Image (cartoon, grey):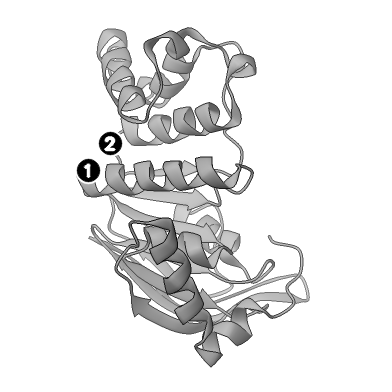
Amino acid sequence: MSLTFAGVSLAFGAEPVLSGIDLTVAAGEFVVLLGPSGCGKTTMLRLASGALKPGRGTVTSGFARAAVVYQTPRLLGWMDALDNAAFGMKSLGVRRAERRERARAILMRLGLAEADLAKRPSRLSGGMAQRVAFARALAVEPDFILMDEPFAALEAGLRRRLQDLVRAETERSGVAALFVTHDVAEATRLASRIVVLSARPGRIVADFANAPAREAAEAFEAAAALLRRSDVAAAINAAGGEEF
């Protein structure tokens, strides 16, 4: 199983966004798309999900079920945390008792307390809400998960804790992941492979394996080493535009 971009280019009107993208994400890989704002990272997620079609080239996926985690949790305000996490399974025909049991197990692994499960989104902290969103994605048992800067709005300490939890859960389930960020240290903490995009129109300027950093200091050291590469530094420091 894999997701493949072959010669993909895309423009919105007269504005070129992506140019000549060739990329394969294999089963079990955690691929991080790293690049400046506006380089087309989110556009690549939309192409991967099927929400967009390329202007040129092809995007093909052999994965059976994909799930998405956005920058904001997008929880349903009239449901509690447990039912929000279980919601995606309803469309799959999973019985209510099983939905709730599966969602509870994932939420507990992600660090929510039993008392938090009955809270509605307005009573959840930002970190709790993102854990619920991630649990909702995992609960449908995807083989491929797309993540669009899901920790960008969180403070640094909480962001690191959730990075560790997400990495542990994806390793545990064997799900493939395509994760968008412009944070170099975050990429080194999560990725089994880092793909660096240039400023718009986005082109792949580097693609290499990565051993996920387990400690904060290790992640910053790896990020510093990454930025010493001239091709990576030029891409990351380039002026971007509005992200699509």
Residue closest to the eye, 222 or 27: 222
| Mark closer to the observer (2, 1) | 1
Please say whether residue 192 is visible from this viewpoint: yes
Q: Which mark is residue 229?
A: none
Q: Which mark is residue 141?
A: 2
How many labels sit on residues?
2
Could you say which quadrant of the image residue 176 lies in? bottom left
Q: Which mark is residue 173?
A: 1
Q: Position of residue 25 (x, y in %)?
A: 33, 66
Q: Residue at x 54, y 62 (%)?
A: 53
Q: Residue at x 59, y 25 (%)?
A: 125
Give the secondary structure at mark 1: helix
Where does the C terminus fall, quadrant-wise? bottom right
Type of residue at label 2? Glu
Residue closest to the eye, 39 or 235: 235
- Position of residue 161 relative to residue 78, above or below, is below
Q: Are marks 2 and 1 in contact (CB under 8 Å)?
A: yes
